[in-house]
Amino acid sequence: MRPVEIGYRFRRTVVALDGSVESRGALERAAEVAGWLETDFSGVFFEDEDLLALSALPFSREVSLGGRSRALDAVALEGELRAQARRARRAIEDLARLRRISCGFEVVRGRLQNMLLAQAQQADLLMLPRSSEPMTRSTGLARLAADVAASATASVLVFDPRKPPGPGPVVTLVDEPENAARTLAVAKDLCRHMRRPLRVLVTAGDAEALASNAEALQAALTADPATRADIRPVETTGKDALLEALADPSGALVVASADTLGAAGIVSLIRRSRAPVLILRARPQG
């Protein structure tokens, strides 16, 4: 199934890059997803102006996790960022040739979160690397991934490039009809590419609506023998239980609508889930 067939086409995909360990491993995974979605693929290398300003101060020092420290050198940092950007550009071009997809690359400088949100306004899908480390040890893009995913205007895929997807299902949530068709279609398409089964959590405001939604969904999926689906009704007695059900430790991917989760739910889901999380937002077709 092609993206245009499911009525939800990602036209421009941007993968966010910086000098972090997570960022260096993000390109291969991002290019793979872009190939599945048949979308243009651009890398944007972010130079954090706050970090550069800090490095110019005479008392600034860099402290490693092992406790060692050294003086920050603004000139050396500028040179290292340029070298990292050159390596990222070459890697993107090589991957695009290998996977036969269109690519682009640019370097931008500014305040990191502001730049990420600005890129989201120009993209249909923003890919953000994250870390499995605690928040206090995460840096750069990885530290901001959950908050940016919650407030961006584009769809956002947050993933840890150092961890392969789990062996379990693609997990998605279906509630309101206007969100359900889009979310389910994208989840089904990605299931085929990832060769994983689909788990659909069905929710509604009351028991009668829940049973009706589950029955309609079962009928729709039965008519599509190419998709193996496990349908699980979930009582909406609390957001916490719903997020726990989505964040299956063995899951390969979580797909959910931003409208369904809300900003606080998105942040909580990303911080709970070991699997990559795809947050969908509506974009006009064209």
Image: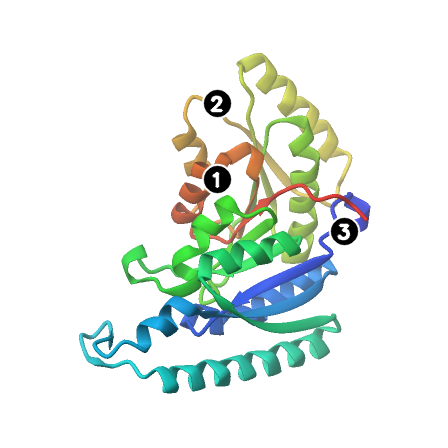
> Measured from the top left, where is residue 132 in percent x and y?
37, 59
Amino acid type at image mark 1: Leu
Mark 1 and mark 2 in contact? Answer it, CB < 8 Å.
no
Question: From mark 1 to mark 2, how far is it between C-alphas?
Answer: 13 Å
Could you tell whether 56 is left or right of 238 in the image? left
Q: Quick one: which residue is furthest to the top in this view?
A: 208
Q: Where residue 3 is drawn, which disc sits there?
A: 3
Alpha carbon separation for disc pair 1 and 3: 24 Å
Any part of residue 1 in sight: no
Sort mark 1 into few (<14), some (14-19) or many (20+) by Cα contacts within 10 Å.
many
Mark 3: few, some, or many residues within 10 Å (few <14, many ≥20)? some
In primary-sequence order, the first of circles 1 and 3 is: 3
Q: Residue at x 53, y 52 (%)?
A: 252
Q: Give the answer, above or below, for where 271 lies relative to 110.
A: above
x%, y% of residue 12? 70, 59
Along the polypeptide, which appears first: circle 3 or circle 2?
3
The residue where tag 1 is placed is 246
Q: Secondary structure at mark 1?
A: helix
Q: Is residue 73 visible?
A: yes
Secondary structure beneath dot 3 equals helix
Foreground residue among 142 and 207: 142
Viewer-nearest of discs 1 and 3: 3
Give residue 101's quadrant in the image: bottom right
Residue 77 in the image, given as x and y percentages of width and height: 38, 82
Kind of residue indicated by mark 3: Pro
Residue at position x 28%, y 58% from top? 136
Residue at x-position 47% and y-position 38%: 263
Please state which of residues 89 and 230 is positioned toward the viewer in this rendering.
89
The residue labelled by disc 2 is: 235
Q: Earlier in the sequence, mark 1 or mark 2?
A: 2
Instruction: Check disc 2: other Cα within 10 Å, few if <14, some if 14-19, many if 20+.
Output: some
In the image, is 42 to the left or to the right of 159?
Answer: right
